[in-house]
């Protein structure tokens, strides 16, 4: 996929960027689209009647349409949020819980899909049930059968583990949850940018994802809500255009997504996110997924032959866009610093905002994580492996 590298001028410096799971690079097309807003129709959206305000509104709605298309949703099912964490916090804080209900999640979640549930369960006195991974670090569907019951309000899971890099059996988990009348919240931070995803086929009720991991700008993300469960939510923030009628004695909420978008949005960022969605769809998510899988497969294969390298995660499961490892008992931060200084290679190190999982991996100082995207090449993976070999000599 070398043809796309030119869209990312930062790569001209020789940077080997293997940290897209934390935040991706942004192509020129997205930057240009954002600048166009500032230069040509810099006005607020959904408010003014003059022409540039109208253009700003229609560009924003075009962006929403593109983002919705990327996840196979309708545009009136997607709100703009700041990032994955915000969308997940919105669901946890906006759901109307009843006494005696429980929440089911897993021990492999990113903090952003664990802490909101831990917090709300404590505040509301609800039971938080945890599905643990197997000893091979796989998530077993049958374990959800044991934890989910008719009192389960919500099942919150990640789509792709940001530490282990495999895809969870979301459709099977959704079937179990729906059989009990429970809703499913999906953390799409790692999946939306990297694999074809259809909320309709998966049957999830909520999905949250971040623009900055999918070639878009920072400060913007998407939040999908299945219209059938909209009445389960009471927005925690209101104001601006999120209401319909207001008097001194009360108000009526606007329809979703406006009800979840109080105040002025990050307009340039939302428009940039729309461009990023179109950029990814133009290349094709199947193609992007194949490229990631091929590069991570190659890295797995090469690292497996090096003595002293420990790779984390299930050996039998295909990894998507990332792989975590350690070299002997070296501190992961030292490894990452050395890779940067010696070879301009950027990888992530530490606890990956998933401390419960990294503790289960028994890795005291965390892990090193390499992650790929559409601009990475085999040569870059080979260079990384060569440098890793230097550590083990
Ligand atoms: C699986 C997963 N969930 C949630 C997040 C949080 O994303 P953000 O920081 O954009 O809110 C991340 C980010 O690394 C992630 O990998």
Image (cartoon, rainbow, N blue to C red):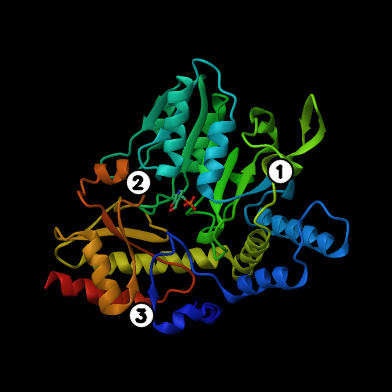
Q: Quadrant of residue 359?
A: top left
Q: Which residue is mark 3?
A: 379
Badge nearest the viewer, 1 or 3: 1
Judge whether residue 242 can be spotted in this image: yes
Q: Position of residue 63 (x, y in %)?
A: 70, 59
Residue density around tag 3, few if under 14, some if 14–19, many if 20 or more, within 10 Å: few
Q: Position of residue 151 (x, y in %)?
A: 51, 19
Q: On the picture, is 305 further left or further right than 4?
A: left
Mark pair 1, 2: CA separation: 30 Å
Residue 354: assigned label: 2
Residue 209: assigned label: none
Q: Is mark 2 within 8 Å of ligand 1?
A: yes
Image marks 1 and 2: residues in contact by CB distance under 8 Å: no
Q: Secondary structure at mark 2?
A: loop
Badge nearest the viewer, 3 or 2: 2
Mark pair 1, 3: CA separation: 44 Å
Residues 18 and 149: in front is 18
């Amino acid at each position: 996929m070398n043809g796309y590298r030119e869209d990312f001028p930062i790569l001209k410096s020789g940077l080997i960027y293997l940290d897209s799971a934390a935040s991706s690079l942004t192509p020129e097309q997205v930057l240009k689209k954002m600048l166009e807003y500032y230069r040509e129709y810099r006005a607020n959206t959904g408010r003014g009647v003059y022409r540039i305000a109208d253009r700003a509104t229609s560009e924003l709605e075009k962006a929403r349409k593109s983002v919705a298309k990327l996840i196979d949703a309708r545009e009136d099912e997607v709100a703009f949020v700041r990032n994955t964490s915000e969308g997940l916090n919105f669901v946890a804080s906006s759901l109307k819980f009843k006494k005696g209900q429980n929440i089911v999640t897993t021990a492999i979640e990113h903090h952003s899909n664990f802490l909101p549930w831990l917090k709300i369960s404590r505040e509301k006195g609800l039971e938080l049930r945890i599905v643990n991974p197997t000893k091979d670090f796989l998530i077993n569907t049958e374990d959800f059968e044991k934890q989910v019951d008719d009192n389960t309000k919500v099942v919150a899971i990640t789509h792709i583990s940001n530490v282990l890099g495999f895809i969870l059996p979301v459709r099977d988990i959704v079937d179990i949850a729906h059989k009990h009348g429970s809703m499913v919240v999906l953390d799409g931070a790692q999946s939306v940018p990297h694999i074809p995803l259809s909320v309709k086929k998966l049957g999830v009720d909520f999905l949250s994802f971040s623009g900055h991991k999918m070639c878009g700008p920072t400060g913007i993300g998407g939040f999908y809500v299945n219209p059938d469960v909209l009445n389960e939510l009471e927005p925690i923030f209101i104001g601006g255009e999120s209401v319909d009628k207001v008097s001194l004695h009360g108000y009526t909420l606007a329809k979703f997504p406006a009800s979840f978008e109080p105040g002025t949005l990050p307009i340039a960022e939302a428009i940039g996110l729309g461009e990023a969605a179109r950029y990814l769809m133009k290349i094709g998510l199947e193609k992007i997924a194949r490229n990631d899988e091929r590069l991570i497969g190659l890295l797995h294969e090469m690292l497996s032959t090096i003595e002293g390298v420990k790779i984390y995660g299930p050996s039998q499961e295909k990894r998507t866009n990332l792989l975590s490892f350690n070299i002997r008992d070296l501190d992961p931060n030292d490894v990452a610093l050395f890779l940067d200084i010696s070879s301009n290679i950027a990888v992530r190190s530490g606890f990956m905002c998933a401390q419960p999982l990294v503790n289960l991996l028994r890795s005291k100082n965390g892990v090193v994580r390499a992650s790929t995207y559409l601009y990475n090449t085999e040569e870059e993976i080979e260079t990384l492996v060569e440098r890793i070999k230097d550590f083990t000599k």
